[in-house]
Image: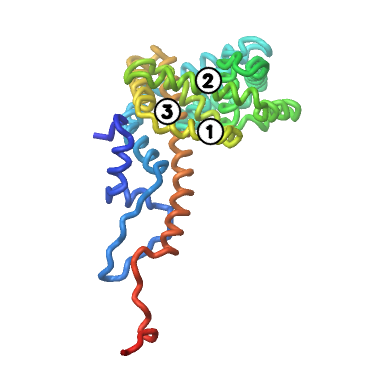
Amino acid sequence: MPPSFEDIDSKVEKAQGDKARFLKSKEGLLPHFEFPSGETQEEKHYSKETLLADIMEERFEGAKEKMQNPILLENAYQYLRDYATQGSARKGENIVNAFWVFQALSSLITTHSLSRLSSKQQNNINSYLENPILLENAYIDLQDNATRGSQKEGKNTSGVFWAFRSLFALITTHSLSRLSPEQQNNINSYLENPILLENAYRYVQYCVALGSQKQGNDTSYAYSAFKTLSSLITTHSLSRLSPEQQNNFNSYFENPILLENAYRYIQGSATQGSEKEGKNTGNAYLTFDLFSSLIIVKDYLREKGKKIDDENFAKEALTPTKNIPPRPEMRTNH
């Protein structure tokens, strides 16, 4: 059974001395080194980020298996297709539908699910990505939310949530380059807007507070928290936060109730979204949507942990912990 999120600190402590986890975690960190005969390998201590990534990966293995359900994927595709039809009918109309299309597209791309679709479905998805009206409507929706969300600090924080989600989707679908230079400059200005970022941070705080009150309650807020966190990671916005805010973000990644509620949300959505083809297509989409965010967070922790571990292991290699006896020629006889 995969580890639960009931007590992450204890899981991390156990993981530090777990040989199997050690063998798995060290892959790619440093070149392989064989200890001389007769010497024992010293226990390695990995960063909390690396171990949290391991725990997330193991905990969500069950959800990953549920996502292999062909009905769930078919329903997610139907959701995408229905909104694409409406969102590309006419410029300036049904712009919210265009937003949902790019969300669905990004979730299928990030979860590596496109290859499981039929050739016809994959061709349709390519046509959605290349549809100028659909992209234009998605941009208009982004512009509206970014404008409202950057008017005043502490105001329209939910609009900021939608704006950063749009930015996340346009980045992960590689659609930014298809926008005009003026539109791309506008997007850069949104990313650099301090009020927009501050409101996004406040929205995360709000969702984390509600999504981590009690295990099994307010799982939708856990979903929104991870969606916003993954959006800030993808848009490289975390580094623009204050040190205190960045520390708070790190604590969110470690919050056991928040992680458990996200797990429960994805399990519930997957169950409903795979009941019957053509039914609960929204739940099917939400399953892929949240799972894509969890992948982003896990990979972020993995990469961050790898950098920390590389530095620590390199320092350990240069600073032997055992006393080395003097070379024979340095000894003197008395």
Which residue in the rendered view is the most extreme toward the left?
1
Q: Picture coordinates of residue 28 (x, y %)?
A: 43, 53
Q: Quadrant of residue 126?
A: top right
Q: CA distance from mark 2 to mark 3?
A: 20 Å
* Amino acid type shown at disc 1: Glu
- The numbered mark, 3 or 1, whose residue comes first in the sequence reads 1
Identify the residue under disc 1.
244
Between 219 and 9, the residue placed more toward the observer is 9
Residue 203 numbered mark, or none: 2
Give the mark toward the camera: 2 or 3: 2
Residue 181 as seen in the image, left or right of residue 288: right
Whether residue 181 is visible, yes or no, is yes
Q: Nearer the viewer, mark 1 or mark 2?
A: 1
Q: Secondary structure at mark 2?
A: helix
Which quadrant does the N terminus fall into?
Answer: top left
- Find out whether the residues at labels 2 and 3 contact each other: C-beta distance under 8 Å: no
Q: Which residue is mark 3?
A: 291
Badge nearest the viewer, 3 or 1 = 1
Q: Residue furthest front?
A: 334
User: Looking at numbered disc 2 in the image, what kind of residue is underneath it?
Assistant: Tyr
Whether residue 19 sits left or right of residue 240 in the image: it is: left
Sooner in the amino-acid sequence: mark 2 or mark 3: 2
Q: Earlier in the sequence, mark 1 or mark 2?
A: 2
Crowding near the residue tagged with mark 1, few <14, some 14–19, many ≥20 C-alpha atoms within 10 Å: few
Estimate how packed mark 2 is, as few (under 14), some (14 to 19) or many (20 or more) residues with alpha carbons within 10 Å. many
Q: Residue 69: tell me if it is visible.
A: no
What's under tag 3, amino acid-wise?
Answer: Phe
Mark 1 element type: helix
Q: Nearer the viewer, residue 74 or 48?
A: 48
Which structural element holds mark 3? helix
**At 45% across and 32% down in the image, what residue appears?**
111
Quadrant the C terminus occupies: bottom left
